[in-house]
Image: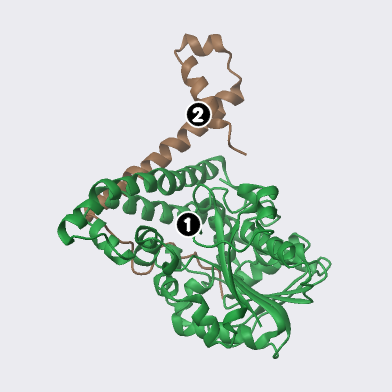
Amino acid sequence: MLELKHELKLDKSRDEKARMNFVSGLRAHVLNDMATGMRAVYDADVEPAFRRATGRAPTNGPEVHKSIKANEYFKFYSSLRVTAQDMVWQSVFPPLERNRPQLKDKAARLARRKKFGSLQLKEGFEVPRYVSAIDVHLMAGNYDGEYEAEDLAAGALYDNGLAVFSFGLMGQNLDDIGQSIAGFIRLKFPNLKPKKILDLGCTIGHNTGSWKDQFPEAEVHGIDVAAPCLRYAHARAQAQGREIHFHQMNAEQLDFPDASFDVVFSSMFLHEVPKKGIEKIIAEAYRVLKPGGLMLHMELPPNGQLSPYEAFYLDWDSAYNNEPFYKPFRDLDPQAVCARAGFKPKNFLQFVIPSVGWYGEKVWSEAATRPPEVDSDKTGRLTDGIMWYCFGAWK
Amino acid sequence: MSREPMRRTIRGGRPYFFADPAIDKILNMVVVLGSEVWTLRERLAARLTALEVDALLLSDYGYGLLADELGEVAAPLV
């Protein structure tokens, strides 16, 4: 289990740490060993049975899902994966509940320090139903749950839960996505000198900070709808000495003026938004980008680029992990979505970027010198050999 | 707004996979029990390490091998 390195880290007993270690180990077992076993069962039994019944191989993820649902290995894999997912959050609640008063005190102390960035929340802000009405990825209370005035506990739940969830594969500061991608963009496009960068749906700002690290001269902003996450994000950035400006805003309707940013980024965000919202968000990104600016979204790869089995494997979350918009998002054609928002098709781009934490600086930086790579069976999976998928466009 | 406990249950409940949901529930119980066994082993390893019990004393009580095994368990803890 990864220990958070910043001042908002929770005080945990040895038993609480042991429970977290157990959950991290269980997730690694399910997502590596059992996932490999399930694939072997599919190849040996499920797929041949489908062929015998239909005279052909499955052509898409839903067909694979339908054919594997009755399989006992699938049931054990899925039941254990749900249990492990629930245990991620349940392992955080006891120390978090006990630490809540101290957490608020720490955040207040951090706010009194030399100000690095800022925080703007809105009285009476309306959180969209697709956030307020569900507990995404089985996280009770979701990003926006508030249990006292000036609450930031939901942000702490996400930060600490992510540390257990990721079993070390998202970097020591949970920012491997941000560091891998922001750094890759700096290497790939050395002439890009952004003055203003925006991170959409930034939650606790764990990947927002990477843009400030890679482009220290830029003014970096992060927006989200969830006040507890933004309070936590601000305190976290203060603790880490990063100058980031956090705002409570809906990415579908930004308050920023036209042509005000050089880079608009998001990570693991769009798949938590319904399709209508995604279209509006991409259109807003187009509006607030300066001409020549870059929009980039790190996401799960589109189903159109994956084999039927891989499509089924990633869409498991949509069916069983309270991620209702995950599959609809992955069924979209990213290039078509960008074109509908006004981006020229010739300005579309997509990459799979090696994780800098997993592969190391040499492999990661060499990837920036090659033509863009897509279509990798390692893309977006928390398993051996992590590649982060991104798409976007130049305005 | 006074401080309320955080909600720990998921709206809509968890999905089940076996024809009888009792199997999913028992599997869940076994895993949670496994977590507690792991936690106890880590605690025991920590106690044995902290006590710096010498190999002779441990072997008198038949715990020599156990201490070696538990030493590995304790190692990754921060």
Residue A333 is left or right of residue A14, and the answer is: left
Amino acid on which the number 1 mark rests in the picture: Trp
Q: Kindly report the distance in space between the C-alpha atoms of the residues bearing marks 1 and 2.
A: 25 Å
Q: Position of residue A293 (x, y in %)?
A: 70, 80
The N terminus of chain A sits in image quarter: top right
Give the quadrant of residue A198.
bottom right
Chain letter of the residue beneath label 2 in the structure image = B
Image chain in brown: B
Q: Identify the residue at image location x=42%, y=77%.
A: A133
Count of marks overlaid on the render: 2
Q: Identify the residue at image location x=57%, y=67%.
A: A390
In the rendered image, residues at marks 1 and 2 fall on the same chain:
no
Q: Which element carries disc 1, helix, strand or loop?
A: helix
Q: Is A22 rendered above or below residue A375?
A: above
The C terminus of chain A sits in image quarter: bottom right
Q: Which element carries disc 2, helix, strand or loop?
A: helix
Front-most of A368 and A211? A368
Q: Position of residue B30 (x, y in %)?
A: 32, 43
Q: Is A166 rendered above or below residue A339?
A: above
Residue A39 is left or right of residue A245, and the answer is: left
Q: Is B13 rendered above or below residue A118?
A: above
Amino acid on which the number 2 mark rests in the picture: Leu
Q: Position of residue B75 (x, y in %)?
A: 58, 31
In the rendered image, which residue does mark 1 sit on? Answer: A89
Q: Identify the residue at image location x=67%, y=79%.
A: A247
Residue A355 is left or right of residue A185, and the answer is: left
Chain letter of the residue beneath label 1 in the structure image = A
Q: Which mark is residue B44?
A: 2
Most distant residue in the left direction: A53
Report which colour depicts chain A. green
